[in-house]
Image: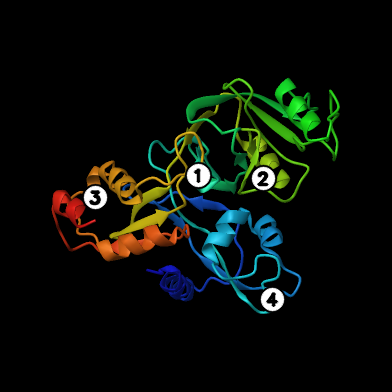
Amino acid sequence: MSSRVPAIARCLSLCALFGASSVVAMEWPLPPPGEDVVGHVQVIRAKYEDTFADLGVANDLGYLEMIAANPGVDAWLPGEGAEIILPTRFILPSGPREGIVINLAEYRLYYFPKGQGVVHTYPLGIGREGWNSPLADARITAKTPNPGWTPPQSILEEHAADGDPLPAYVPPGPDNPLGPYKLTLSLPGYLIHGTNKKFGIGMRVSHGCFRMLNHNILQLADMAPVGTPVRIINEPYKFGLSDGKVYLEAHAPLDDTGESSVVDRHAAVINALLKREDLGSLRLDWDMVREVVAAEDGLPVPIAGPSAVIASSVATERL
């Protein structure tokens, strides 16, 4: 069953509803208590020279989330006038809305500044195969502008084996892989940092650290103090409430170590749903749930309205 075309059609209808045609900053007011959805999907028309990589940098979106939201569109040459979906509507991750939350499956970071009633969100590059980013609770222990980089021995050996030897120390500057700023985490060896490469944000590209666009890391570093909690999770399926409707947002799953996963997606969806006790009495459209899970396009889609009721056990059996 192909569900991508219907998903795009719903997205275009949503964009028409919101009248969204221009890019907005990725800072959103927190939704009211009991609600979970922020932002709105946007549609733009590509210029001849546009690529998904360039559009991602301009709109604080990662490469893979642009690909997922625009199936069938050439990422390197969408074409003059092509309609491009910007997936700038999000279900907030589950759990406390405080500090920094990194969702590996989403390649995205959320920052909830204390007492401000807003959320900032940024795309991330995460650890590639063999260098997986961890699942953990941590905190920021240091903030360093214009960092130098001393490659660890494992990375020196990897590059040497590939015929691309690294220097023992890379000074601050435009060639430094850490970019203009680094945030040191309480997890030994792990950082949130900028980059000297534009391509790779929103992909599995790093040696386990969290790579950000340079203007994004500078914004985050200016806001997040030392001691900020950092919660690293892996949620490919996010359920949320907004205006009396239940939404589901689906991403391609990674396993608990960050590897690409072939898990039982339906079981994973049920597990995610069971964590939301407030949704247990709502009747979901399970045909739509299956469609959203199959599409994995990262777009929040309504899967239930406010009036229907059904037992969770029956819902589980139908899925």
Nearer to us in this view, 181 or 25 = 181
What is the quadrant of residue 129 in the picture? top right
Question: Quick one: label 1 or label 2, which is nearer the N terminus?
Answer: 2
Q: Determine which of the numbered discs, if any, sits on residue 216 in the image.
A: 2
What residue is at 38 percent from the left and 41 percent from the top? 94
- Of tags 3 and 1, which is closer to the observer? 1
Q: Quadrant of the N terminus?
A: bottom left
- Of tags 1 and 4, which is closer to the observer? 1
Asked if the residue under mark 4 is in contact with the one under mark 3, i.e. CB atoms within 8 Å, the reply is no
What is the quadrant of residue 295 in the picture? bottom left
Residue 107 location in percent, x, y?
A: 55, 46
Label 1 sits on what residue type? Ser
Q: Is residue 195 above or below residue 310?
A: above
Residue receiving disc 1:
260
Label 3 sits on what residue type? Leu
Label 2 sits on what residue type? Asn
Question: Quick one: label 3 or label 4, which is nearer the N terminus?
Answer: 4
Residue receiving disc 3:
279
- Of tags 1 and 2, which is closer to the observer? 1
Residue 15 location in percent, x, y?
A: 48, 72
Task: For marks 3 and 1, give the CA distance.
Answer: 28 Å
Label 4 sits on what residue type? Gly
Question: Quick one: label 4 or label 2, which is nearer the N terminus?
Answer: 4
Q: Residues within 10 Å of mark 4 (few under 14, many from 20)?
A: some
Horizontal side, residue 311 vs residue 151: left or right:
left
Task: For marks 1 and 2, give the CA distance.
Answer: 26 Å
Horizontal side, residue 137 vs residue 279: left or right:
right
Task: For marks 4 and 2, give the CA distance.
Answer: 28 Å
* Element at label 4: loop
